[in-house]
Image (cartoon, helix red, strand yellow):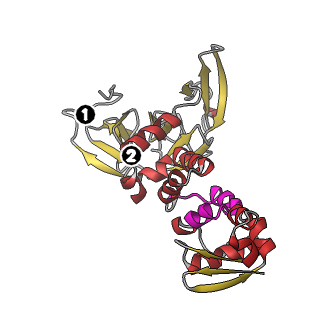
Amino acid sequence: MATILVDKKTFKVSKRTLMDKSDFFAAMFASGMKETTQNSAVLHDVSAGVFRDLLVFMETGKLRCEIDEELLTAAAFLQMQGVIEHSLRHVDVTNCIEFLSVAETHCLPKVKEAVLKFLTENFLDVISSRTFEHLSSELIDSVVKRRHARKRYLFGLGSYDDSSKERSDLPRNIHLFDDVTEQWQTGCDLPPLLCTHACGVAVLYNYIFVVGGYTSSECTQMQQVATCFDPLTNNWKELPCMNQCRAHFALIPHDDYIYALGGCVSFSSQSSSVKKLLSSVEAYSLRGRAWVGAASLPKETAQPCGASC
């Protein structure tokens, strides 16, 4: 048995357990230092509570608490690869900044890469969290570049063939154009409830946003679905619907917003369907996860064109 003094508390631990689970202790007890003959050691800069949690991991292979900056720092100091590997699978929006700080301080390249991978693949969630406020501009630029680092494609969304009304309720596919092979290929399916007729489409931070439009080519019902597709994870994510249903409008990304300009809205009036042109403008805030009002167009406009500059 070995005696470990931590923060004025004494722990009796199997020497073999310490050496098997910690490269720090393995090197210490094999070094010929006084700890080798005395089977004892004093640890500094590690709290007794954290060391107790690490001992549980040594003995069971499980952590009884959430891994945080203090625990990961201690694991890095004691060179406990098991805990470090555990941290790679538990990066989230609440601990990623702390993990990155520990990784850079203690030279943990795998942890740093795990954090960057998390930020890259979950950027839409990160940008709307408090964590985003603590990201440096350099780190944000790096994550945005990583989101665009993979092979780039042109993409297209299919609408409907008015001559085939009986099939107009079928969802469309995303089509990708490979500029190397100069061939179009079929991408993922759209969500079952998402229609692409007269919808708005925009790309921001390599997310594809699809909102608004009609539920079918018959244009009798406005769509209440908004979503975005992440080509990095091949997943769709549901978004809040616009405050104003609209079709045949422009959807334009600018800064951390997506602006919906003009368009038209359809509604039933007795036995007929009426379309009303819109001048209203609203913007989806990626930070606030909500649609907010913006200055209206000077005139009601359907099928407007626009670009960010």
- Do tag 1 and tag 2 residues touch (Cβ < 8 Å)? no
Viewer-nearest residue: 95 or 105: 105
Above or below, 84 relative to 34? above
What amino acid is found at the position of numbered circle 2 in the picture? Cys
Quick one: which residue is furthest to the bottom in this view?
9
Above or below, 46 relative to 210? below
78 is within the stretch colored magenta: yes
Upstream in sequence: badge 1 or badge 2:
2
Percent x, y of residue 65: 61, 74
159 is within the stretch colored magenta: no
Q: Is residue 275 visible?
A: no
| Label 2: element kind | loop
* Label 2 CA crowd tier, 10 Å (few <14, some 14–19, many 20+): some
For the point 41% across and 37% down, which residue is it? 247
Quick one: which residue is furthest to the right in this view?
16
Describe residue 228's horizontal placement relative to residue 61 as left or right.
left
Q: CA distance from mark 1 to mark 2?
A: 15 Å
Provide the residue designation for mark 2: 245
Residues drawn in magenta: 72-93
- Disc number at residue 300? 1
Above or below, 150 relative to 296? above
For the point 51% across and 48% down, which residue is it? 119
Percent x, y of residue 185: 67, 23
Q: Quadrant of the C terminus?
A: top left
